[in-house]
Image: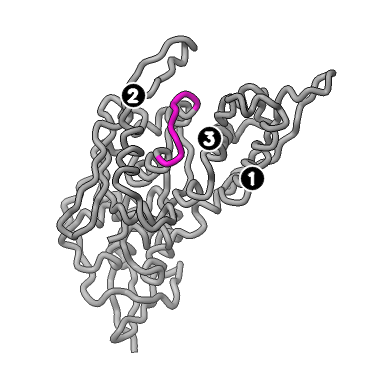
Amino acid sequence: MKVLSEYNIIEKSNSLVLLDKYAEIEEAPYILLDIYLSLINPREKNTKTVKFPKSDYEDLKNIKRVKPSTLEKDLQKLMISVKLPDPNDEEAFRMKPLFSECSCKKESDGQYWITMICEEEMNDYFFNISKIGYIKYRLGMMRKLNLTSRLLYNELHSHKYKKPYYLSIDELAKIMKLTTKNFKNTKEIMRKLRESVDSINDNTNLKVSFKKLINGNKEITGIDFNIVVDENQIDEDLSMIISSLMNISYEEAEPITKAAQLNKLDDDDVSERINYILGKSNVKNKIGYAIRIMSDELWNKIKNNDNNKDSYIDGEVVTAEKSFTKEYNEAIINSSEKKYKLYADEDGKMRKEYLD
């Protein structure tokens, strides 16, 4: 079973973005951290334990095999203590590990699975996004960026509403980890900046331009960034997100997408409802129920612990959609046997009617 997809959504807290400036996390562990963030629900602390096949990690990195010794070193770097800054005192800090457990072992399916569990005292860094804010991107975007570009992306994304967003040349070098002796030359820093901005523009949902600020001695003192977020690059293909979550084909996901769009749901709403369905063992037709549960009326009943029994749609798996009519909230489906339509009745219950 494939768990990871480049369409996995990451919601990274501003605290973790700030931590990027201080923690010495290398490129491979950084990818593992993003994978972890893509598999948790940052609004539910009970999702802090995640598991994924080692083969998925290898596919994401586009390599045939990660040696166990290499993987062990990468995971070990996530378990060492990181320095947590004090927002009120630049010289004060605390040391805490990000993760309490990272492991890799062979399961009953014959595959090696990686398990990651965040440290209990670090929960607020992972699961407090509604209070402290967050940035949002797809896992696949980060795969195409090197570490320097990732760090700049995080910084710019978290300040996207500042027009322009100013960074001194020293601040920029620090954020991009370019403060070693190899990057004391401003020209070298500017070269890395141009490379990173090009990579961000080509591969992510940010469109970035910048202007150099020069003093009377013709020295570059800082950079003004203009940042535009293309939200369509996150939400443009909801069917792929649903397909990844439910482990179904793109065509099977399309009727669910149409129902979600009619009810004006964002990908967070859809993911929450899909995960609810995946946790129900008694749903006979998960695709049909997923279409129905996109209705706010039904979802609100579920969230309010309504005692009405859910009625499920029996029958074959939906394989394709021909049309979806807003006026009647109905999907016309071609099944392996007969053509039928799914529609919501006056009580908001989904019904199936075979067509001639």
Q: Mark 2 packing: few (<14 Cα in 10 Å), some, or many (20+)?
A: some
**Quadrant that contains the C terminus:** bottom left
The span picked out in magenta is 21-28
Along the viewing direction, whichever of 342 and 89 lies nearer the viewer? 89
Left or right: 264, with 39 as reference point:
right
Reply yes or no: does residue 79 show up in magenta.
Answer: no
Mark carried by residue 81: 2
Q: Badge 1 is on which residue? A: 207
Amino acid type at image mark 2: Ser
**Secondary structure under badge 1?**
strand
Residues at marks 3 and 2 touching, judged by CB atoms closer than 8 Å: no
Q: Distance from label 3 to label 2 (Cα)?
A: 20 Å
Res 77 quadrant in image: top left
Q: In this view, does 20 lie above or below 115?
A: above
Q: Please provide percent x and percent y for residue 298.
A: 29, 55
Residue 26: horizontal and vertical position, in percent? 44, 35
Of the two numbered discs 3 and 2 in the rendering, the one whose residue sits closer to the viewer: 2
Q: Determine whether, in the image, residue 143 is placed left or right of residue 182.
A: left
Spatial CA distance of label 2 from label 1 is 34 Å
Dot 3 alpha-carbon crowd within 10 angstroms: few under 14, some 14 to 19, many 20 or more: some
Residue drawn at point x = 67 percent, y = 31 percent:
189
Question: Which residue matches tag 3?
Answer: 151
The amino acid on which the numbered mark 3 sits, given as a three-letter code, is: Leu
Q: Which of marks 3 and 1 is nearer the N terminus?
A: 3
Q: How crowded is mark 1: few (under 14 residues within 10 Å), some or many (20 or more)?
A: some
